[in-house]
């Protein structure tokens, strides 16, 4: 190849790479979260979304150089909204389950979860199946905790399911629930509040190998990019900084 042609080819290749980089940097991404699951996702006094999920979403977007908008979506409609293309991804503390994997893809896990029972301090609760017999136990609907109650305790206890975690807390506080089953980390956060001071964890954690991932439409190109970005923010310390903002222990 003549030198002039070689220089021209290199220049054309460099221009193409720059255009590709600009296209990546300009990618627009719409991400849904629930906004009612403190401290992972909630709405502050200014009406803005915040929390661990929101901070992780922003860190991933910064790593991918994507122009992201984060929106709130009620939990019951969050997967249908993704499939209807109202947004491109869900970062809302969603457990990776076989049932969900039939309709959406998931990123690699960005944290791990266990379940825990919560009840009033001074209330001696036996969290064995026999000990929970006849009690009224609550959880958020369409969650791992809710499914666990229905599958394992529905035949011996009165199971009440709620549209939001906050409403489950309200009924526990009002005495309409004997026990609440929850993801441990949001319950831990609630126990630090004024509303939660009269309550505590009961019994042992329930470890069901629950992994939390980012939900995407089947076959979506963003899955690989989210995985690469997640690996990067773990390695560069950004993930640890966000974790420490909400918990005095690692949830990764």
Image (cartoon, rainbow, N blue to C red):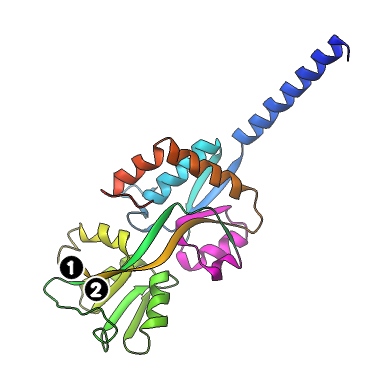
- Residue 199 disc label: 1
What is the spatial separation of the Cα atoms under label 2 and label 1, in whole angstroms?
A: 9 Å
Q: Are marks 2 and 1 in contact (CB under 8 Å)?
A: yes
Tell me what residue is drawn at x 58 percent, y 52 percent: 88
Q: Is residue 137 left or right of residue 12?
A: left
Q: Identify residue for label 2.
A: 172
Find the magenta span and give its range: 74-103
The one of 183 and 175 positioned closer to us in this rendering: 183
Task: Identify whether 177 is placed above or below 207.
Answer: below
In reply to whether residue 81 is colored magenta, the answer given is yes
Label 2 neighbour load within 10 Å: few <14, some 14-19, many 20+: many
Residue 22 falls in which quadrant of the image?
A: top right
Task: Identify whether 43 is placed above or below 141.
Answer: above
- In the structure shown, which secondary structural element does the residue marked by tag 2 occupy? helix
Q: Along the polypeptide, which appears first: circle 2 or circle 1?
A: 2
Tell me what residue is drawn at x 20 percent, y 57 percent: 192
Tell me what residue is drawn at x 41 percent, y 54 percent: 111
């Amino acid at each position: 190849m003549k030198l002039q042609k070689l220089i021209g080819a290199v220049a054309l290749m460099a221009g193409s790479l720059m255009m590709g980089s600009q296209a990546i940097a300009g990618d627009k991404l719409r991400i849904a979260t629930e906004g009612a699951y403190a401290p992972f996702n909630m709405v502050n006094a200014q009406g803005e979304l915040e929390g661990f999920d929101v901070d992780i979403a922003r860190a991933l977007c910064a790593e991918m150089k994507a122009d992201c908008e984060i929106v709130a979506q009620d939990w019951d409609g969050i997967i249908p909204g993704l499939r209807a293309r109202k947004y491109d991804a869900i970062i809302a503390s969603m457990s990776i389950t076989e049932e969900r994997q039939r309709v959406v893809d998931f990123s690699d896990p960005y944290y791990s979860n266990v379940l825990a029972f919560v009840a009033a301090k001074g209330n001696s609760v036996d969290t064995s199946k026999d000990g929970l017999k006849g009690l009224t136990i609550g959880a958020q609907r369409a969650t791992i905790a809710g499914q666990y109650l229905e599958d394992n305790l529905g035949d011996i206890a009165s199971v009440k399911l709620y549209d939001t975690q906050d409403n489950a807390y309200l009924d526990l506080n009002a005495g309409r629930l004997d026990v609440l089953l929850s993801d441990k980390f949001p319950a831990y956060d609630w126990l630090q509040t004024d509303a939660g001071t009269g309550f505590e964890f009961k019994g042992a954690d329930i470890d069901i190998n629950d992994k939390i991932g980012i939900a995407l439409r089947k076959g979506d190109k963003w899955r690989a990019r989210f995985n690469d970005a997640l690996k990067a923010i773990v390695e560069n310390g950004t993930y640890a900084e966000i974790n420490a903002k909400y918990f005095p222990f690692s949830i990764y």
